[in-house]
Image (cartoon, helix red, strand yellow):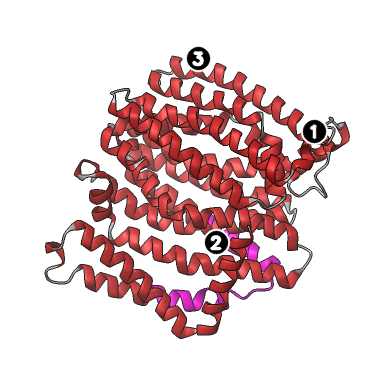
Amino acid sequence: MLLLARLLAPEIFGYFALAGFWSGILNLRAKAGLNYAAVQHKETTGELLGTYYALDAIMTSGGLLLAAVASIVLSLLHYPIQVVYILIALMSTDVISLLVSPLSMALERELQLSRLGLITLIGYTISYAVAIAFALTGHGIWALISINLVYVPLASIGVYLFTRQRIPKVFKMKWRFDRTLAKTLLQAGLSAGLSATALSTVVGQFDNFLIGTFVGVTTLGYYDRAYRVAQWPNILIGFVISKAAFLTFAKVKDDPPRLAHTVRLMFWIMTSLSVVISLWLFFSASELITVLLTDKWLPSAAFLRFLSISNLLWGFVSLGFWLSIALGHKRETIIMSMVQAGTLIVVATPLTLLLGSTGTLAGVGTSMLVGSIVSCIYVFRHVNLRPVDVFVRPAIATTITIVILAMVTNATGWSDLSALVRTLVIGIAATIILLTILFILKPSETIERVRYLMKTWRST
């Protein structure tokens, strides 16, 4: 994607980000929440697979119908035609992923997360190679569209092959639709699905809609690239929180000590590793943009500084969200999601109209702060942990690290160093300083959590 950013114009990424927002709004599969309900089912049976498949097919068909109507409406509203093309392409790939969706769900149920991660890695490696070839040959926007068109079929093949290898029993089962089970899955999944949509699409992409619609697709392109750079080093941590943590929560929800230990570990990841990444992005935003994307993308640097903080808060939001789903607290799940989504819409919309992209950032920051506070309140109400034990030591370590990094970046001769050297120095310094202070404050805890995290990751 970094090479694509060097080859393509900012507005192309803006078109894609705006279409991604509408795709998320129209996608009924995500809103049904079938996956969240199915992975918590007692066992993998033919009834579960067949019912899941039938419901997923219905949701996919409904999403395609909505996309067709939306394409006409967006054209009448004078949206760029490129946005309509991308929307149709994104929604159409759902048909391909539908073919193996029960198999993917079964792999998740069996905690085959490392296999799913390998599928993702291989699929994206090949699809990006194709996209780069398109960009080099002057196909512009089709370079980005080709990523999904290539990745989804490859990932589907990978899911099929790994299922054959790891859990072949699913192919020997007689898949059939069960009306009672269908009702159960929908009842259990809808609250999670709608709440996840509120987070991923409204909270996660409403800023794209505001900037792309009221400011411009070029500015959205700069914002989107900053977002992608901010997400790139956070992919692993986000995967642990959204996938491994949720599945672990679901397994140990009836064992309070083990649940508390898992939540404590997630907090440690966010208050140590996530903080390191956020500090690195914040203090080296301009340097990172220059090194990764070239000077033509420097307008993205201001967005990157903001997103470094926003992504940190997002981790706390996700923790409470996935815990509430695992514990079956539907009301709390909906409240947390809707409070944050509502805050974003109410605050960011008027501020964007008044202040442009600066207003959007202010609205996003406000919603993230509100969401993280509400999420943490929920977590500490349902898990035997004390906020003091979770936050005090990381707060001390973070404050000291910020002071030292500020001194380093304002030192005489700092600007004389190359952008690459400054980036590396900030990243290494942030890591060493923060983790060293945390180790000094409580060495046994740091060692134990690192060992536990490595053991857990290898087992998935």
Q: Position of residue 118 (x, y in %)?
A: 54, 47
Choose between 460 and 144: the one closer to the eye. 460
Across and down, in percent, residue 194 comes to 65, 40
Which structural element holds mark 1? helix
Amino acid on which disc 1 is placed: Thr
Asked where in the image residue 14 lies, by quadrant, the reply is: top left
Quadrant of the frame with the N terminus: top left
420, 341: nearer the viewer: 420
Segment tinted magenta in the rendering: 370-399
Location of residue 129 (image quadrant): top left
Task: Say whether residue 126 is magenta.
Answer: no
Name which residue lies at 61% across and 31% down: 97
Q: Earlier in the sequence, mark 2 or mark 1?
A: 1
Question: How many marks are shown on the rendered structure?
Answer: 3
Q: Is residue 71 left or right of residue 285?
A: right
**Real-space Cα separation, disc 1 to disc 3, in angstroms:** 33 Å
Give the residue at mark 1: 51
Q: Earlier in the sequence, mark 2 or mark 3?
A: 3
Tell which circle, 1 or 3, labels the residue nearer the N-terminal end: 1
Q: Residue at x 73, y 42 (%)?
A: 189
- For label 2, the residue is 373
Can you identify the residue that label 3 sits on?
Answer: 72
The amino acid pointed to by label 2 is Ile
